[in-house]
Image (cartoon, rainbow, N blue to C red):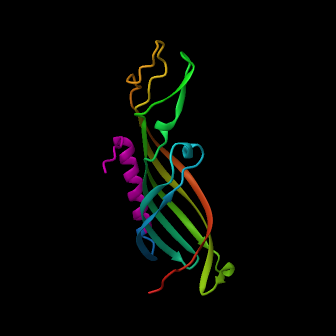
Amino acid sequence: MKILFNSNASSLFYLFILSNLFLLQSIIAQQSFSIITGAGVPVSGLNNWYGSAPIIGLQYIVQNNEDKKTIIECHYQLFSDNSLSDREFYWVVDRNNYKSPDADANMDWIDFIIKSRIYFPDKARSIGQKKLNPFSSYGLGLYYYNHKVSGLIYPGQSKRPLDTEFQLSPIADKRFAWGANVGIGFETVLNTN
């Protein structure tokens, strides 16, 4: 897996990671490290392009006290199951719809999140032999994506018939963004050692 970063953004990203890891290492607390997996479900228009995609990540947890954890997560996912080659565009010259059979798109996501999770032990509930511990969380994240699209037929052609070999140049959209996240949930222990 090769990921290309702008050198200034890359330096800033690594400095951000290291400074936060050093900050958390100085806290006297219980610590754990894990590999996490899951599924990312695209929303807000991105679901028109892609279906769900697997996520893999690393998670570092610092137990500050009984009611609070600091969590650092880094995730990677690749959306590649796109429906772009099945979509039609309207060509105004002959007023017909056409598909771009060579169209392809994929999007890499990488994120780095630091969040605080606060538990409410007085609100814990039991279901069977399992104890559900409610929590709320808040944090900040640095998000990077790289979206590549290629193989689209150029729709600005003016001569008939439509030349399906005349395609737009491949497009790559790469961006960094800061984001805030908040959430609520329940935690339970599935297996005790």
Please identify the quarter of the rendering in which residue 56 is found. Answer: bottom left
Q: Is residue 183 left or right of residue 13?
A: right
- The secondary structure making up most of the magenta span is helix
Asked where in the image residue 119 lies, by quadrant, the reply is: bottom right
Task: Specify the quadrant that holds the C terminus.
Answer: bottom left
Q: Is residue 133 above or below residue 183?
A: below
Total label count? Answer: 0
Image height check: is 85 above or below 193? above
Residue nearest the viewer, comparing 116 with 164: 164
Residue 148 visible somewhere in the drawing: no
Which contiguous range is marked in magenta? 1-24
Near-viewer residue (111 or 42): 42
Q: In the image, is residue 190 part of the stretch drawn in magenta?
A: no
Q: Residue furthest left?
A: 2
Residue 85 seen anywhere in this rendered image of the structure: yes
- Image coordinates of residue 146 in percent, x first then y, are 42, 42
Quadrant for residue 118, please give it: bottom right
Q: Position of residue 142 (x, y in %)?
A: 48, 51
- Which residue appears at 42% of the width and 74% of the height? 32
For this orientation, the residue located farthest to the right is 123
- Which residue ends up furthest to the top in the rendered image? 159
Is residue 15 on the magenta stretch? yes
Q: Looking at the image, which residue is at 54% across and 44% down?
A: 46
Residue at the (61%, 62%) spot, across then down: 183
Q: Position of residue 81 (x, y in %)?
A: 45, 47
